[in-house]
Image: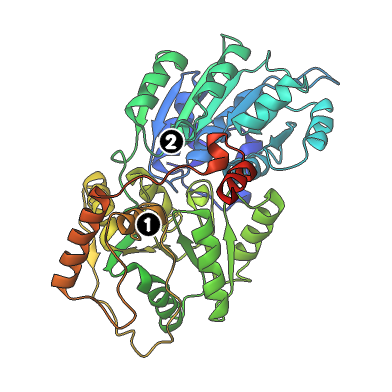
Amino acid sequence: MTFDQLGLNQGLLRAVQDKGYTTPSPIQAKAIPAILSGRDILATAQTGTGKTAGFTLPMLQKLSEKTSEKGHRPIRALILTPTRELAAQVSESVSAYSAHLPLKNMVVFGGVNINPQKAQLRGGVDILIATPGRLMDLHQQKALSLGQVEFLILDEADRMLDMGFIHDIRRVIKLVPAQRQNLMFSATFSKEIRELTEQILIDPQVIEVAPENASAERVTQQVYHLHPSHKATLLCHLIDSNKWEQVLVFTRTKHGADRLCKRLDAKDISCVAIHGNKSQTQRTKALEKFKERKVKVMVATDIAARGLDIKELPHVVNFELPNVPEDYVHRIGRTGRAGLEGHAISLVGDEERLFLKRIERLIDKTMLVLPMPVLKNLPNLPEPKLEGDQAKETPKHHRDRSQRNGYAKPSKGGPRSAQATVDARTEGNVVKKSFKKKPKAASRRGINPLSTLGSKKA
C-alpha cells in the first residue's frame, strides 16, 4: 500500500513526499482510513511506529475540507500531550504535514512566559497542541475558547493519567462541544485508561498493531548485574571502549541525573542533563545539542521517555531501572525507530532485581545477561550517595537512641569484644532501671534562688 491509496489530498501527499515517506506504517494504514470515515479511535502501537502521522494526516485532511471564515480562526482541533517535549515534537510534525495547506497551528506548554502565548492566540489558530496544565491556565485567563473544537486528540493518554492530569482532562471534556471526533493514541493502555475511554469515546474502532506493552522488536536488550557504586565506572568503560558517539542515559531521579552528568564531564565525556528542574530553555538547548551530536551523552529522567524523536539514536542505557515497568518500554523506544536497529543496556543493582522481573514479565521476554568486564584498572569514580529506598545507613536519631539504651560506642583502643558488648548492654539496662529523677531546679519550682542562697548563709 502507498499513501496515494489512503485517500489523502495532494497537499498532504506532497508533504509526505518531502519527509521521504513512501509506504505507510501498519498503524497509519489502519488509522488513516478509519479517521477519515469519522470514527472515534482507540489505538495502541509500540512507540516509534508513526502514531503521530497516523492521527495528524487524516485530521489535517478533514480540517482543510472546511476552511475557516476570513479573519476568524477558532480552535478546531485540540491535541493534548503529557510533556513539553512531546508537545513540541507533535507541533513540528503538524507544521511539516500542513506545509501546503491553509491551516495554522501553535503549541503551548508551561515553563515559559505565558504572555507571548496569549498574544499568539489572539491572532487565531486552527490546531492547538498543549499540555493540560498550561491549557487550563490559558482558559482561566480567558485567552482561548474551546467551543468550536471538532477534533479532541489524547496522545500518550496513559502517561497523562500517570502524571495526574485526569482532572484537567475531565475539565477539558466539559469545555469542548459534545459533537466532536475523539482520537486516543498510546503505546500502552492500562485498565484506568480503558475506563476513561468509556467516558470520552463513542463506539470507537479499536486498533492494535503490536502486542500491548511489547518492547521494540528491533532493539537488542541486555543487562549487567553489578553493585550500584560500580555503575558510573562501567558506563564510562562502555562509552570509551565501544566508541559510542550518541547515548541516551536514563536515571530515576533529577539529582541523580545531574550527579551522573558531572561525573561523565569529569571523565571528559561531553554530557547534558534534562529533567523537570531544568527550565524549558535549558531543556530545549540540551536536546538540540544532543540531536546535533555536539555532546555524546544526554542523561534524562522519564520526562524524556516519551515524545523524543531522535534520528538514528543507536544506544539507550538504563542507569537505573524505572519503578513502573511500562516506562521501560517507552525508554528503549527512543532507539530502534523507523525500522532501524537499536541497542538498550540496563545496569541492574541488587535492589533493582524485582524491577527487572516485573519488566521481563510485562514484555514477556528474558533479557540477555552480559558478563562484567574487568574494571579494576580503570580510574575509580566516587561512589554515589544512595537515596530513598537505596539508602542503607541507619538514621542518626536511631543511632543516638541505641546509644542511649546502653549500646555504648567502641573505645578508642579498638572494637569491643562480644562479651564486653554484652556487659555494656547489661550494665546500661541496670543503670536505666535504677535511675532516679533529678530534683527540679529551684527556679523551676517557683523558689527565688537568691532567697535560697540567703537562707543557706543564715
Whether residue 217 can be seen here: yes
Percent coordinates x, y for residue 366 in the rendering: 20, 56
* The quarter of the displayed image where residue 123 is located: top right
Percent coordinates x, y for residue 326 in the rendering: 35, 43
Q: Is residue 408 left or right of residue 28?
A: left
Residue placed most toward the observer, 421 or 173: 421
CB atoms at circles 1 and 2 under 8 Å apart?
no
Rendered residue at 30%/45% (across/down): 214
Q: Looking at the image, is mark 1 or mark 2 earlier in the sequence?
A: 2
Whether residue 204 can be seen here: no
Q: Which mark is residue 186?
A: 2
Disc 1, SS: helix
Q: Within 10 Å of the Cα at label 2, are there few (<14), some (14-19), or many (20+) other Cα atoms?
A: some
Q: Within 10 Å of the Cα at label 1, are there few (<14), some (14-19), or many (20+) other Cα atoms?
A: few
Residue type, numbered disc 1: Asp
Residue 344, relative to residue 232: is it above or below?
A: above
Q: Which mark is residue 400?
A: 1
* The quarter of the displayed image where residue 144 is located: top right
Percent coordinates x, y for residue 280 in the rendering: 68, 49
Rendered residue at 28%/70% (across/down): 226
Residue placed most toward the observer, 91 or 274: 274
Q: How many marks?
A: 2
Rendered residue at 66%/24% (across/down): 136
Q: Compute the Cα span from label 1 to label 2.
A: 51 Å
Residue placed most toward the observer, 455 or 345: 455
Residue type, numbered disc 2: Ser
What is the residue that sits farthest to the left in this orientation?
A: 419
What is the residue that sits farthest to the bottom in this orientation?
A: 377
Disc 2, SS: strand
Residue 11, relative to residue 317: is it above or below?
A: above
Percent coordinates x, y for residue 137 in the rendering: 70, 26
